[in-house]
Image (cartoon, grey):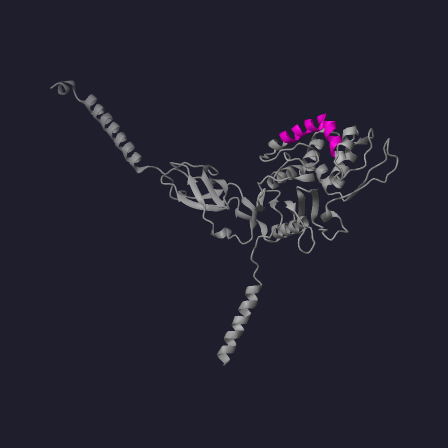
């Protein structure tokens, strides 16, 4: 009976300890397309149909903002055209701009990125590209420059068009590029902004409230770590969201496209984004595969002096990334490639080859350096040869001396 009680107790303790083990499980994402990336390394942590063409809706405005910041002074003034007001389909968000109104690029950018105003997008496009079509050409050119291979824009705001599309990965590329600009970061993280009075709008009642509930403090989706970036919605695109989040000196960027509402009535774009960020921060961490000056291997230089011929090969650079915490880096086997005919003399710091590790189909590589000088040992065969030559020459000299000392009659006898 006592034995049974002990077995049961041990089994119970095992279950408790087993239940406390955290296994990294990829989040369950309802959105049709998604991606999660660590910003500084570009490491993709999660992807779902990330390269599939989708309608981007107002996430398009990320590219519009990039081109504005690269082509305009924020203090420039733009004039609102008839087209900017009356070309918008009914029901699309606008900033209540007035035909002929003069407004600064700075204020138009707040209307664009905070309220997601479609009229502001057209004013900016016409100001820079001369027309919506001209600006779209610039958008497509910039997309190609950024490495976007499955993107095509026909307007600056994401109003639906069958020929206006992108992918989660391409939108990540645009957002990542934009977030390198501090002014861009300011716009996409702003929760509220009031447009000032202008020549045709004397009051200050045009308040721009962010469409991104993750940075709106009173929202149930608010997350103190989220730093923007841009929402989107059309009937065809459904709910979309590009988001950035910072925690413990790490920045992640996520994209979710074609999201709906779950059974509990919650917005899937926010639920999915939170799940992605939780996964990225909790299950991953920065780690070194190899540190600078770590000894990777030790070799013997055949013609080196006895006390220097054993040579450590050290890493030139640190190899690190943002890895899943379950990855056992200690068990990884390096692939070492050495230069041919490694012979002394060798100077400390000389490149002798390289080392590489393949992790999740990505290769991490650095050069291998000599840890110290290797002196060339003296070759005994050469010494024997030199001694032999010297003795031969010495013998010839002795014979010539003796020959000269002999009497002439003996020399010719």
Asked whether 332 or 184 is in front, the reply is 184
Coordinates of residue 246 in the picture (x, y in percent): 67, 47
**Going by the picture, which residue comes out furthest to the right?**
202
For the point 47% across and 42% down, the residue is 356
**Going by the picture, which residue comes out furthest to the left?**
413
Q: Is residue 279 left or right of residue 107?
A: left
Coordinates of residue 255 in the picture (x, y in percent): 64, 44
Asked whether 412 or 114 is in front, the reply is 114
Q: Compared to 393, does 15 lie above or below? A: below
Q: Is any part of residue 77 visible from this angle?
A: no
**Residue 278 shown in magenta:** no
Q: Is residue 245 left or right of residue 5?
A: right
Task: State which region is magenta.
Answer: 121-141
Q: Is residue 341 left or right of residue 17?
A: left
Coordinates of residue 135 in the picture (x, y in percent): 69, 28
Q: Can you tell which quarter of the image residue 128 is in?
A: top right
Q: Is any part of residue 121 visible from this angle?
A: yes
**Going by the picture, which residue comes out furthest to the front?**
90
Asked whether 32 or 68 is in front, the reply is 32
């Amino acid at each position: 009976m006592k034995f049974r009680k002990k077995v049961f107790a041990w089994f119970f303790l095992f279950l408790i300890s087993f239940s406390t083990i955290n296994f990294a499980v990829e989040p369950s994402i309802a959105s049709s397309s998604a991606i999660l990336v660590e910003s500084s390394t570009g490491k993709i942590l999660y992807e779902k149909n990330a390269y599939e063409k989708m309608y981007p809706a107002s996430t398009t405005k990320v590219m519009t903002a990039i081109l504005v910041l690269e082509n305009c002074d924020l203090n420039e003034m733009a004039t609102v055209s008839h087209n900017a007001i009356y070309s918008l389909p009914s029901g699309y968000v606008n900033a209540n701009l007035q035909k002929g109104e003069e407004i600064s690029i700075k204020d138009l950018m707040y209307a664009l990125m905070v309220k997601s105003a479609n009229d502001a997008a057209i004013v900016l496009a016409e100001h820079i590209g001369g027309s919506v079509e001209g600006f779209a050409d610039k958008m497509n050119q910039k997309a190609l420059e950024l490495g976007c291979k499955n993107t095509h824009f026909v307007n600056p705001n994401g109003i639906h068009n069958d020929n206006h599309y992108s992918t989660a990965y391409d939108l990540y590329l645009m957002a990542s590029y934009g977030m390198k600009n501090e002014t861009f970061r300011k716009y996409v993280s702003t929760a509220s902004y009031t447009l000032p009075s202008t020549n045709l709008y004397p009051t200050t009642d045009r308040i721009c409230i962010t469409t991104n509930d993750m940075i709106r403090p009173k929202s149930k989706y608010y997350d103190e770590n989220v730093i923007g970036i841009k929402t989107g919605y059309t009937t065809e695109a459904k709910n979309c969201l590009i988001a950035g989040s910072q925690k413990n000196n790490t920045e992640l960027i996520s994209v979710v496209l074609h999201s709906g509402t779950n059974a509990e009535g919650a917005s899937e774009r926010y639920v999915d984004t939170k799940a992605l960020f939780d996964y990225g921060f909790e299950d991953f961490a920065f780690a070194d595969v190899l540190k600078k000056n770590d000894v990777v291997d030790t070799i013997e230089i055949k013609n080196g002096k006895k006390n220097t011929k054993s040579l450590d090969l050290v890493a030139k650079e640190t190899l690190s990334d943002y890895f899943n915490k379950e990855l056992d880096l200690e068990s990884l086997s390096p692939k070492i490639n050495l230069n041919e005919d490694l012979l002394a003399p060798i100077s400390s710091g000389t490149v002798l080859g390289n080392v590489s590790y393949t992790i999740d189909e990505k290769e991490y590589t650095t050069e291998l350096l000599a840890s110290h000088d290797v002196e060339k040992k003296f070759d005994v065969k050469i010494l024997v040869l030199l001694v032999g030559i010297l003795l031969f020459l010495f013998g010839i000299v002795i014979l010539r001396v003796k020959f000269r000392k002999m009497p002439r009659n003996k020399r010719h006898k």
